[in-house]
Image: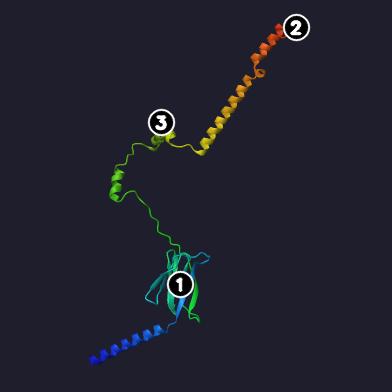
Amino acid sequence: MVTRIYHFLGLTVLFSLLLATLSAQEKKIVQFSGLISSVGGELPVPFVTVTNKSYDNQAHAADNEGYFSFVAHVGDTIAFSSVGFEPTSMVVPNTNSDKYTALVSMKSMVIELPAVTPFPWASIEEFNRAFLALDVSNDDASRIRRSLSPEALAALSRVVPRSADEIQTYNSMQRHINMTNKNINQRFANPLFSPIAWGSFINSIVKGDYSRKRLKY
């Protein structure tokens, strides 16, 4: 009796495998191609992983333009996955041709990560040691006075480059000083604007230095 049961189970398994093989052989083979783009836009989704779930999870990859092409069977379930996009899938439909082209749309996925607060201490014990060793002898006011002291500002001025506003202000002041000095020099170099020259000229007229007889006009 037990032997008959084992024979029956063996025949059942063999028959199931034979049916599965015949079913696989009866499936139509097509060249499955397509383009993968994002939903709501015409931008391609590059390097998407394309997996044939019905054929030993055979994996393929789309190129940088979102194009893929491989051999599949009619009725195969094809899954599409990519980082930053929601996974999607489709079934290869029956077609009269030996080629099928699909337009696959993938929806972008926004993932909000939980907030993380970084600390400069690796553990609570290290924080406690740093907190106990903290120097609180100087308050904020004393630190501000020390930072704004003439010595500190002079040291900063030697190493910190000037900003664009400072350079423009300095150049404007230099141009103003040069123009002022130029006008002053021209005013004093011209005898018409010199009161001393005018006084000497008037004294010469009074003394008769410029009379017609002396000048022989």
- Compared to 195, does 87 lie above or below? below
Residue 74 visible within the image = no
Hey, what amino acid is under mark 1? Ser
Q: Is residue 109 left or right of residue 198?
A: left
Tell me how far mark 1 sits from mark 2, CA to CA: 119 Å
The disc at residue 151 is: 3
Q: In this view of the protein, which residue sits in the foreground, 156 or 119?
A: 156
Residue at mark 1: 69
Q: Hey, which residue is sitting farthest left in the picture?
A: 2
Marks 1 and 2, the one that precedes in the sequence = 1
Marks 2 and 3, the one that precedes in the sequence = 3
The disc at residue 213 is: 2
Tell me how far mark 2 sits from mark 3, CA to CA: 74 Å
Q: In this view of the protein, which residue sits in the foreground, 45 or 211?
A: 211
Query: Percent position (x, y) of residue 40?
Result: 53, 66
Residue 189 visible within the image = yes
The N terminus lies in quadrant: bottom left
Q: In this view of the protein, which residue sits in the foreground, 132 or 89?
A: 89
- Compared to 190, does 50 lie above or below? below
What element does badge 2 sit on?
helix
Query: Percent position (x, y) of residue 70?
Result: 44, 73
Tell me how far mark 1 sits from mark 3, CA to CA: 72 Å
Q: How many marks?
A: 3
Hey, what amino acid is under mark 3? Glu
Q: Quadrant of residue 49?
A: bottom left
Asked if the residue at tag 3 contacts the one at tag 1, i.e. Cβ–Cβ closer than 8 Å, the answer is no
